[in-house]
Amino acid sequence: MLSNLQQQPADALLALIKLHNSDPRADKIDLGVGVYRTGQGETPVFGAIKAAEKKLVETQDSKAYLGPEGDMAFVEALMPYIFGKANPTMDGRIEGMQTPGGTGSLRLAIAMAKRAGVKRLIVGKPSWPNHNQICADLGLEVLEFSHATAEGTPDMNALRGAVAAAEGSDAILLHGCCHNPTGIDYSNDEWDEIAGLLAEKGILPIIDLAYQGLGNGMEEDAYGVRRVLAAVAEAIVCYSCDKNFGLYRDRVGALYCMAADKAELVKIMSNGHALARANWSQPPDHGGAAVRLILEDEALTAQWLDELDQMRERMRQVRAKLAEAGKTGGVDLSPIGGQNGLFSIIPFTPEQVQAMREKHGVYFAGSGRINVAGLTTGNIDRFIAAVADVTA
């Protein structure tokens, strides 16, 4: 029976990792993998996480199952940062559960939406490739609209048109901040308009908040989520701690549902628990427990936020340096300065992408998406020179 399976194409990013690793050049540059790197090119464990893990080892007295909902103290500790300290549960209308990373949360959210009657998911293009892959695997139709204009701003006309054409059984997926792969985010005024459009249309928003704190700050990056949830009756928020706590391999995430009536939450979350049970049974505990310990301790919280600030500031400095280069060869790098998060897209042709790899040892996705955190004071000038060379 297994011989009936069809060969699947290799994941493009995993293939890129292999290409980079096999390049013998000492000065090669990896801008492909979506992880934060320091100015020395390292992806360290947060000091706050190390301290929390030490405390966890010393105090944890059991490895018994927690259930499909995971560590609910972890889930609840995150809520004030996502939804605001004044009323994080929206008068009891929001409840959550732990998931294996942001991907697990998205998988669960889309499966719940389908079970609730959603037929199509409206997604901005380009988006994180796994969004469409999850929909395809679940048999949910994807409707795409242009996320950004050629000038590097959000394409609000395309979004308005997509919402206007939506049907009652549709849902829409929005990036809460630090758009992957473009880095092009909605302004607060645009979020205000989006919230009004969604409230008027009545379609279900699913908000992917995978990079909170890496754009403009923890509070600033939550504006869109809070604005939309204040306007609509129902919503799902998918959260990842992989980036803002540096817990990539520990797979730490959460899913939150907001109900029109808090009396419906038990029924809604029972479906999340049942789907989780059928998929991964229980989420991994270690990383979520470490986050919980940080958020329960004022000193560790302050240390974590300071480390997060340093990450964001370094990426801001890289973006400013790229923007300063302006028109470089045949491309303009200046819009990168106004974008957010780990990623930006440079409009390379396929031939230019190949030339960057073969001639200059610079590796990034075929779409032109670069991870700006892969650039350091030691290699950024060489990168800019390489861009000028292949695009001239």
Image: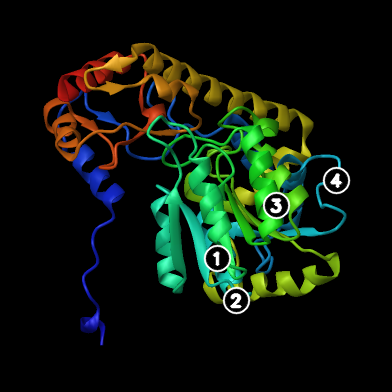
What amino acid is found at the position of numbered circle 2 in the picture? Arg
Q: Residue at x 76, y 75 (%)?
A: 267
Q: Earlier in the sequence, mark 1 or mark 4?
A: 4
State which mark lies toward you, 3 or 4: 4
Question: How many residues crowd mark 1 within 10 Å: few (<14), some (14–19), many (20+)?
Answer: many
Q: Which residue is mark 4?
A: 87
Q: Which residue is mark 1?
A: 110
Separation (CA) of disc 1 from disc 4: 26 Å
Q: Which residue is mark 2?
A: 115
Separation (CA) of disc 3 from disc 2: 37 Å
Report if residue 373 is visible in the image.
Answer: yes
| Label number found at residue 63 | none
Q: Earlier in the sequence, mark 3 or mark 1?
A: 3
The image shows residue 311 at horizontal and vertical percentages of 53, 25
Q: Secondary structure at mark 3?
A: loop
| Nearest to the observer: residue 17 or residue 206 | 206
Question: Do callouts 2 and 4 mark residues in contact (Cβ within 8 Å)?
Answer: no
What amino acid is found at the position of numbered circle 4 in the picture? Asn
130 relative to 240, above or below: below
Quadrant in the rendering for residue 218:
top right
Q: Secondary structure at mark 1?
A: helix
State which mark lies toward you, 3 or 2: 2
Q: Residue at x 30, y 47 (%)?
A: 13
Q: Secondary structure at mark 2?
A: helix
Separation (CA) of disc 3 from disc 1: 34 Å
Q: Earlier in the sequence, mark 2 or mark 4?
A: 4
Q: Which residue is mark 3?
A: 60
What amino acid is found at the position of numbered circle 1 in the picture? Ile
